[in-house]
Amino acid sequence: MSKEIYKGLQQLGSKSAAPQSPEEAVLEYVPNPRAGTDYLVRFTCPEFTSLCPVTGQPDFAHLVLDYVPADMLVESKSLKLFLQAFRNHAAFHEDCTVGIAERLVEEMKPKWLRLGGYWYPRGGIPIDVFYQTGEAPAGVWIPEQGVANYRGRG
């Protein structure tokens, strides 16, 4: 495979500072080398953090991103930096989860995408937020996300 698909990437292979906000973060994409084949890509971010917009206290989540690419793939380092940009971002769980998914859908234009946001308890109540673009393409193996409901330490 030609390395031509990696030309133009600014973050991969170079020192990249963490963006200060999700809006400042640059998501980079590469052409899908298997564009004629439907398959699933999964990214798991078990240590996602953002800030409560009311108290400023940190919120923690386990994110599972599944997508069936069309013409483009999201470059993983840029995705990592994008998610890291939420560390100082104040927003409710729903806004973070849906905003991440909507930006990826808008820019990458996958055939299908779902994002599970499994948030740890705030005020004693865990909040899970799910986003999906529609029905998954027929014939693609879509495993369960495998994140158990929050049960505390017991």
Image (cartoon, grey):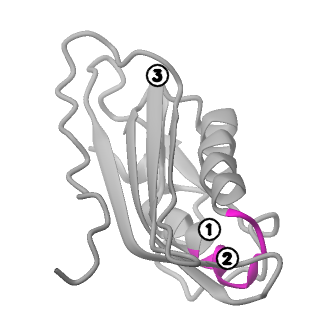
116 in the magenta segment: no
* 14 displayed left or right of 149: right
Kindly identify which residue carries mark 3.
111
Between 80 and 66, the one lying in front of the other is 66
Q: Which residues are magenta?
A: 84-92
Q: Residue at x 36, y 19 (%)?
A: 136
Between 57 and 83, the one lying in front of the other is 57
Q: Residue at x 49, y 18 (%)?
A: 134
Q: Is residue 42 above or below residue 50?
A: above
Q: Is residue 58 above or below residue 84?
A: below
Q: How many numbered circles are shown? A: 3
Residue 25: x and y in percent read: 72, 68
CA separation in Å, label 1 and label 3:
21 Å
| Among numbered discs 3 and 2, the one appearing first in the sequence | 2
Callout 2–callout 1 Cβ contact below 8 Å: yes
Residue 139: x and y in percent read: 19, 13
Q: Quadrant of residue 88?
A: bottom right
Kindly identify which residue carries mark 1.
82
* Dot 2 amino acid type: Ala
Q: Quadrant of the C terminus?
A: bottom left
Q: Quadrant of the N terminus?
A: top left
Specify few, some or many for label 1: CA neighbours under 10 Å numbering under 14, 14-19, or 20 or more.
many
Q: Quadrant of residue 7?
A: bottom right
CA separation in Å, label 3 and label 2:
26 Å
Residue 17 is at least partly visible in this image: no
Residue 82 is at least partly visible in this image: yes
Kindly identify which residue carries mark 2.
85
